[in-house]
Image (tube, rainbow, N blue to C red):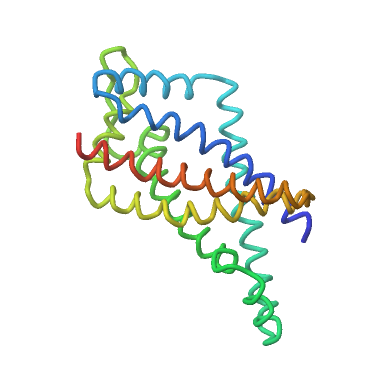
Amino acid sequence: MFFRKSIIALTGLFLCIFLIVHLSANSILVLPEETARSLYNSYSTTLRESPLIKIVAYILYLSIILHVIYALLITINNRKAKTKGYLVNQYKENSSWTSQNMGLLGISILLFIVVHLANFWARIKLGMGEGVGLDANGHVDVYEVTYSLFQNGYYVVFYTLLMVPLGLHLHHGLKSAFMTLGFYHKRGLRTIAKVSLVYAIIIAVGFGIIPSIVFLK
């Protein structure tokens, strides 16, 4: 069990770092179109062509897979453990709603990832669906793909709403990761709890508000 939790903690921390980088890149989208298109497409081209970034991308895919698999195994074990009444009561008394429903939150996030990859990664990386053109600089026009998708009001609402479970998941998961890895300093944990809350709000609000800004351009 400790091994599984450690894998979840380590992959979760790596994914937290990735989200910061990803949000920074997505922030380009709020700039004026003539600036945003050039910068965003140039950035996307660098990611696709850099050997180092390709290695990081494979680590990212592996981290997501391991995080999901081990989280699912632990959730199943916890559900089995809660079949006994006294365990159920003790569990509810000593844990928050978020910690009790990390599995449900994780499934919501996984749904978002699948839909997100189908609309971006599959189209751009695998060439599935409508073809993607080039911008004035000869770069694959990833900006146009993103901009067009964020003109779909239904997708914008879906994207924004799914940031709520992401924020809750990050808030609990980030502070729990440090405890799983053996960090038990009382004052340090209080600081980590505050940092986790701020981090979760920035990530959830940041990702959640960008589609609306692009939609209203």
In the rendered structure, the answer to whether residue 41 lies left or right of residue 19 reads: left
List the single residue furthest toward the front.
187
Relative to 152, say whether 168 is above or below.
below
x, y percent for residue 188: 72, 46
Q: Which of the image's four quarters has the N terminus?
A: bottom right
Which of the 4 image quarters holds residue 58?
top right
Query: Is 22 placed above or below 157 here?
Result: above
**What is the quadrant of the C terminus in the image?**
top left
Residue 204 x/y as whole percent: 44, 47
Q: Residue furthest bottom?
A: 85
Question: Quick check: 181 left or right of 68?
Answer: right
Q: Would residue 127 appear left or right of 151 to someone viewing this image? A: right
Q: What residue do we see at 30% from left, 12% from top?
A: 137
Residue 141 versus residue 4 in the image, above or below: above
Question: Camera-side residue: 191 or 205?
Answer: 191
Task: Choose between 109 and 182: the one closer to the eye.
Answer: 182
- Residue 173: percent from left, percent from top: 61, 53
Rendered image quadrant of residue 30: top left
Q: Residue at x 33, y 43 (%)?
A: 209
Residue drawn at x 66%, y 75% as measured from the top left: 91
